[in-house]
Amino acid sequence: MEVKSEINAIVSKIEVSPGAEVAADDVLMILESMKMEVPVTAPVAGRVRTIAVVVGASVEEDEVLMEIDLS
Amino acid sequence: MSWTPEIEQLERLRRLRKRMGGAESIARQHAQGRLTVRERVDLLVDADSFQETSTFAGAAKWDEEGRLESFRPMAYVTGQANIDGRPVILEGGDFTIRGGAADSGTPYPRVEVAWLAGELRVPFIRLLDGAGGSVRNYDPEARKAGGDPTMPPGHAAADEGPLVDVQRTGTPGSFDLPKRHDFSAVAPTVEDHLATRMAKGNLLAQVPVVAAVLGSVAGLPAVHVGDCHFSIMTKTAETFVGGPPMVSQALGLTVTKQQLGDWTVQAKTSGVVHNVAESEADAFAQIRRFLSYLPSNVWQLPPWAEPQDDANRRDESLVSAIPKRRTAAYEVRKIIEAVVDQGSMFEISSLYGRAMVTMLARIDGFPVAVLANDCRRDGGAMTPAACIKTERFVDLADTFHLPIVYFADVPGFMVGPESEAAGIIRFANRASAAVREATVPYISIVTRRMYGVASVVAKGDGMSVRYAWPSAESGSLVAQGGVMAAYRREIEAAADPVARRLEIEDRFQRMASVLRQPGLARPMEIIDPRDTRPAIVDYLRKSHAVNATRLGPKLRVGMRP
């Protein structure tokens, strides 16, 4: 399952690594937009397959941030 | 001697009418994943409540024996029905007949039903599918040749005999221009007040008007998309004032219908359409939901419903809803959910002007209009789009007497080249004016930031009340922006300018707390966030009696900035 950005922002922190088990609503990464830190949370429980962005990258709305395999 | 033969002919005509543009056209409509106008009406309204009007609109030919020879139906279905037991008036474009094109036969009956909605003071719903006028309508040559050769021929009504003629028609030289509705039959009585007289002819000032975009909608029907209180479209529909051929002619641009006006254009970028539906059934469910919060007309109060939720419910999540870190964002919809009656949220225009959330909901059974800044979008700043959305939503609430509940966390109007070029100064003024003009009960909850002129959305005059949470802070501008502007010389002269700036900022930041300077936010009271719902319920109950004495159209004088 793809986790997409809801906003145009800069990736300020990534809280998980590939392979990590996550529960629904866990914080996956923090995006920064207009000086606000916007958490990206897991839509479902699962295992992180890939992370598509790096800290400092600017992302656009609907851009894929990471992929999660459903557990 | 009786009129039975004539009645039989009329029944026959009615049956023909129900066949719309014929099996072939209906199959084409279905193949596009779209329903026919009659299927739409059935899905929208209460079972067995639809009473068709102007069934016979169009042109029928009768032979000398008084038998029906042929029938050219109007490309619109009109009628009365009930939604959740309340009367509505509706019209629907019939795309299976000449692509739903307007012709000289159609404007009159359609204006008549809008008229009826005004007279009966009930909601008016437009199910739009079809283009506006066609030049074919006033081409004498095309008429002489027997109609538009590009249109499918009339279909034979096998067991019925006469042909249903689906060719275009029209009076040469006539244009299908929009008419203003003049409800002359509803002459105000002496006891009607001034506003009623002034609202004459203005349907939007009197009853809820809804438009659904369900196919390709262009021309006059596209104008109707904007002439309403609530519009919705499916993801397979489009709307534009002029379609690809016209764009190509006028601008030399090659565009698709989708590029011109699908949901991403009209519901996200332009904001002309409020909501997007996953299916036509979903569109009708949302229309019914929208109407459930509104009175049938402005002379009535919004429909109160026995609440299923405890008026004094104190939601524990509210204590920690606002993060302690000032820069940490949160989902404001969770706060709204914790405060309003359970299951009562209906978001309007969620894809446009997203820094401001607008929702219809219920609190203690009272329908309310909820405004909330979303700090996850544009930092919660009032962008031009957020201002336009706020202005329209406040007008909607004020028109239909819905109390407004505003969750304020606003750093100000949006700064920057993009915002200025889009006219933020104008739209900031207009949003402020709408709030100022509103006379409905207005309850603001300052949850975090309330800065600058944008804080006028937390109304301070009229029938308003303002509460603040301990997390609230206020000022004429955010310290981080203002300190550098006001203390530039001092900061630049310091041995460590950055440290000096942070030091001053920190000093102002602490001063901005509502606990230190409640006068800045001017709350009536600083409350425990868990007491928000009981506080709102208390004010709603008390202000309700006053709200009930202020019914009728809202008198708006002069012009907005």
Image (spheres, coloured by chain):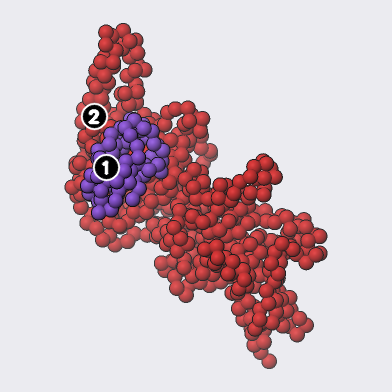
Query: According to the colouring, which chain is red?
Result: B
Residue shown at 81%/60% (left/top)? Answer: B141
Is B332 or B87 nearer to us in this picture?
B332
Q: Is residue B1 above or below residue B20?
A: below
Relative image position of residue A16 (x, y in whole percent): 25, 40
Labels 1 and 2 share a subunit: no
Figure colour of chain A: purple
Category of crowding for the residue at label 1, using alpha-carbon neighbours closer than 10 angstroms: few (below 14), some (14–19), many (at least 20): few
Quarter of the image holding residue B327? top left
Q: On the rendered structure, is B65 left or right of B561?
A: right
Q: Residue at x 74, y 62 (%)?
A: B148
Amino acid type for the residue under numbered disc 1: Pro
Say which residue appears at 58% left-offset and 69% top-offset. Answer: B27
Residue B41 placed where, x, y %?
51, 67
The residue identified by callout 1 is: A18
* Chain bearing mark 2: B
Please name the residue that numbered disc 2 is placed on.
B513
